Amino acid sequence: MNEDISDIKPLLEIEDSSFTIFIIVVFIFASIALFLLYIFIKSLWLKRSKNRKKIAFKELENIDWSNAKEASYKISKLGKELMGEDRRIAEIYEQTLSVLERYKYKKESPQVDDETLKQYNLLVHVIHESL
């Protein structure tokens, strides 16, 4: 009874690549999901930055000129936020800053003159066109 049975062969290892295929499919779906998430977040970020610019523009439009010093500082800050990459806006912004210099860095600033208001209105108009 201790004889070897010759009809029965040993177990063979069957190559199974289903786990590898599963990992590849999961990786592809995860990559697609991450890409779609990136596009979604990017679109939200762009909308948010446009909304920030619109809010800053509304503040720029509604500047109170009763205190010229405070108004000039506020225009400087808001203009920098709204400038962006447009050369025309950058040039007009620089011109406006040079006109506003006479109201800054002084204890008592003079009343706003017509030249300053014209330069301010030009800046507001050009920024409004770009939005």
Image (tube, rainbow, N blue to C red):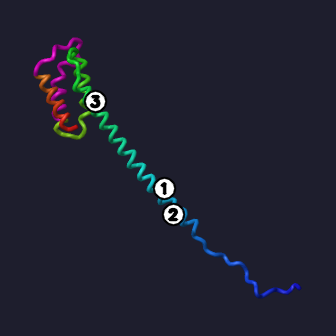
Q: Position of residue 15 (x, y in %)?
A: 61, 74
Q: Relative to 99, does residue 85 appear above or below in the rendering? A: below
**Horizontal arrangement in the rendering, residue 82 relative to residue 3 (left or right):** left
Indicate the quadrant containing the C terminus: top left, top right, bottom left or bottom right: top left
Residue where numbered disc 2 is placed: 24
User: At 37% across and 42% down in the image, what residue appears?
Assistant: 44
Indicate the quadrant containing the N terminus: top left, top right, bottom left or bottom right: bottom right
Q: Distance between the residues labelled 1 and 2?
A: 10 Å
Residue 56 tag number: 3
Q: Where is residue 86 in the image (x, y as percent from the top left)?
A: 20, 40
Judge whether residue 101 is colored magenta: yes
User: At 51% across and 63% down in the image, what residue appears?
Assistant: 24
Q: Which of marks 3 and 1 is nearer the N terminus?
A: 1
Mark 1 Cα-neighbour bin, 10 Å: few <14, some 14–19, many ≥20: few
Q: How far apart are marks 3 and 2 (CA)?
A: 48 Å
Q: Which of marks 3 and 2 is nearer the N terminus?
A: 2
Residue where numbered disc 1 is placed: 30
* Magenta stretch bounds: 90-114
For the image shown, how many numbered marks are present on the structure?
3
Q: Mainly helix, strand or loop, the magenta region?
A: helix
**Horizontal arrangement in the rendering, residue 18 relative to residue 11 (left or right):** left
